[in-house]
């Protein structure tokens, strides 16, 4: 496979950076790209280009502006195979997952927000006034302005476009930095933007890292009007400090330590299959993944045995092999982080039901970042492996007796992103889901998404909600106009 050169996209033109860094394929360690790191001056140029493009972009009639979003979606689908190969080369994820989730959602995000922008109503009130007449109040919404977008490596195109689409739909211009770990599909999107004639400066892509690189240059830039960020909670905290001097709005989708509650009246096979998917999908590298499983005691031993079987059925194969159901972690660096938790769990007293180490294949996969799907039991709720996000294909299973105990266990965390409840008693399902202190609660399902719904978490899992009309609260600023009638 030829080594790509991934450049910055600034003011509608592709530019080299001040230096390049290597991007390796995590499935086999091969060099897939040399990535051009943007300088501070180049980030400044991108912000200036976005500022210059803003008035005309914001003034476009919404149908004309959103026509560009539909064109971007069409472009992703037109170049589906290019995006698929790029995403898999960056992440090592199985072709089945990337072709059904990552790339289709890239297009879907643009279409969803184009539709929302076109069908927006305007909040208004007729107000009775003391003189016996009335006044009209209405909220006139304008774009936030130049938006900084910083995205993570686990669902690269999905999460990049989950931010870029609403930003553009509501009239903002964008300076976006994909993760240095997965720079390829963001660069392809810039190519599509050029192909569809998106006005220069509306959408800019700069490559680089966080501290003392493009990420920090964006978050500390005085002419950026707000930051939408997805990534680790600790990074979110750092970015909050960076934007504080400018008192700028932030939209944060951060980490999670999500629970699954399996009641004895659950559809057992559905719960096993659903929990296995929520633990091991994308090699456990989804912020919504389950890392804590609580099972009602009468079915606990049976459930542990069944989930062990599911873990051991996973096919740790080559990404392009359709039989592969789990690829490698995104990098050797991330594998070291996950392995440190596998070691810590044993120190904290875990029983390793399955997994716990690195598989050996006797082929090029041994140069990849593969790891065994792992299940723990026996840890105390105070263990670090129960409190801290691992972000790999691993979960802990513990028993509970009563619904109240299950709710308390699930909510005993500083995160607040997602939960899944498995029960055939839907009265209980509604009750327990509503009791979860999370942004997203699924009942008898997981990662089932309607893009009009609020998405996000509380506590260490983030600030704000994006999705549907909820994205308005970050990507637009309302002016309430009151007209005396
Ligand atoms: N809540 C969600 O929707 C969601 C979705 C995906 C991932 N995540 C979380 O993201 C994490 C994994 O992604 P990651 O490792 O890429 O996260 P990360 O925080 O290490 O990096 C995310 C992005 O932030 C940039 N960055 C890092 N330090 C920065 C700084 N000081 N200033 C500006 N930018 C900086 C990185 O270059 C990258 O582009 C996990 O914790 C996962 O839970 C959350
Ligand atoms: O890793 C986190 C996954 C986030 C998914 C979304 O933001 C979404 O489905 O819109």
Image (spheres, rainbow, N blue to C red):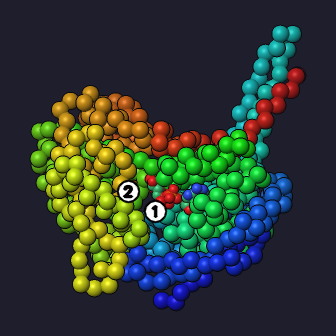
Look at the picture and state if 137 lies above or below 332. Answer: above
Residue 322 seen: yes
Residue that badge 2 annotates = 391
Q: Are marks 2 and 1 in contact (CB under 8 Å)?
A: yes
Exactly how many numbered labels are in the figure? 2
- Front in this rendered view, residue 365 or 288: 365
Mark 2 CB lies closer than 8 A to ligand 1: yes
Viewed as shown, does residue 461 lie left or right of 406?
A: right
Which numbered disc covers residue 461?
none
User: Which element type, helix, strand or loop, lies under badge 1?
Assistant: loop
Q: CA distance from mark 2 to mark 1?
A: 10 Å
Residue at image location 38% in from the left, 50% down from the top: 389
Viewed as shown, does residue 400 lie left or right of 190?
A: left
- Front in this rendered view, residue 247 or 149: 247
Look at the picture and state if 389 lies above or below 479. Answer: below
Residue 439 seen: no
Residue at image location 55% in from the left, 74% down from the top: 184
**Comparing labels 2 and 1, the label whose residue is closer to the camera:** 2
Residue 239 in the image: state x and y as whole percent: 60, 50
Residue that badge 1 annotates = 154
**In the rendered image, which quarter is residue 412 located in?**
top left
How dense is the environment of label 2, judged by Cα within 10 Å: few (below 14), some, or many (20 and up)? many
């Amino acid at each position: 496979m030829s080594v790509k050169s991934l450049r910055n996209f600034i003011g509608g033109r592709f530019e080299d950076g001040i230096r390049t860094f290597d991007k390796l394929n995590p499935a086999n360690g091969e060099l897939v790209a040399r990535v051009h790191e943007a300088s501070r001056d180049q980030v400044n140029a991108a912000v200036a280009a976005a500022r210059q493009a803003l008035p005309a972009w914001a003034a476009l009639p919404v149908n004309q502006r959103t026509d560009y979003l539909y064109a971007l979606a069409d472009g992703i689908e037109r170049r589906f195979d290019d995006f698929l190969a790029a995403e898999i080369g960056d992440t090592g994820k199985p072709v089945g997952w990337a072709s059904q989730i990552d790339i289709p959602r890239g297009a879907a995000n643009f279409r969803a927000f184009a539709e929302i922008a076109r069908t927006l109503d305007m909040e208004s009130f007729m107000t009775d006034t003391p003189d016996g007449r009335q006044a009209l109040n209405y909220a006139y919404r304008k774009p936030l302005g130049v938006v900084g977008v910083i995205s993570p490596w686990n669902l690269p195109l999905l999460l990049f476009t989950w931010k870029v689409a609403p930003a553009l739909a509501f009239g903002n211009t964008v300076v976006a930095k994909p993760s240095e770990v997965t720079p390829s599909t963001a660069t392809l999107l810039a190519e599509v933007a050029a192909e569809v004639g998106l006005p220069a400066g509306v959408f800019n892509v700069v490559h680089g890292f966080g501290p003392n690189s493009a990420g920090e240059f964006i978050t500390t830039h005085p002419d950026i009007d707000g930051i939408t960020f997805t990534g680790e909670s600790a990074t979110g905290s750092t970015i909050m400090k960076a934007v504080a001097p400018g008192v700028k709005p932030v939209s944060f989708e951060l980490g999670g330590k999500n629970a699954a509650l399996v009641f004895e009246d659950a559809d057992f096979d559905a719960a096993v299959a659903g929990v296995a998917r929520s633990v091991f999908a994308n090699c456990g590298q989804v912020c919504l993944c389950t890392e804590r499983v609580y099972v009602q005691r009468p079915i606990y031993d049976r459930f542990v045995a069944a989930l062990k079987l599911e873990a051991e059925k996973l096919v740790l194969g080559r990404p392009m092999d359709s039989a592969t159901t789990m690829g490698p972690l995104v990098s050797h660096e991330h594998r070291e982080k996950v392995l440190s938790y596998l070691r810590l769990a044993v120190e904290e007293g875990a029983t390793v039901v399955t997994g716990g180490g690195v598989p050996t294949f006797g082929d090029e996969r041994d140069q990849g970042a593969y790891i065994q799907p792992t299940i723990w039991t026996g840890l105390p709720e105070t263990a670090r492996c129960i409190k801290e996000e691992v972000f790999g294909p691993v979960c802990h299973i513990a028993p509970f007796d009563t619904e109240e105990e299950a709710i308390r266990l699930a909510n005993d965390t500083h995160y607040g992103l997602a939960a899944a409840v498995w029960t055939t008693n839907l009265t209980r399902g509604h009750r327990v889901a509503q009791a979860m202190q999370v942004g997203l609660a699924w009942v008898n399902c997981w990662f089932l998404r309607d893009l009009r719904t609020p998405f996000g978490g509380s506590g260490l899992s983030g600030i704000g909600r994006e999705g549907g009309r909820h994205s308005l609260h970050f990507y637009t600023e309302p002016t309430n106009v009151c007209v005396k009638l």
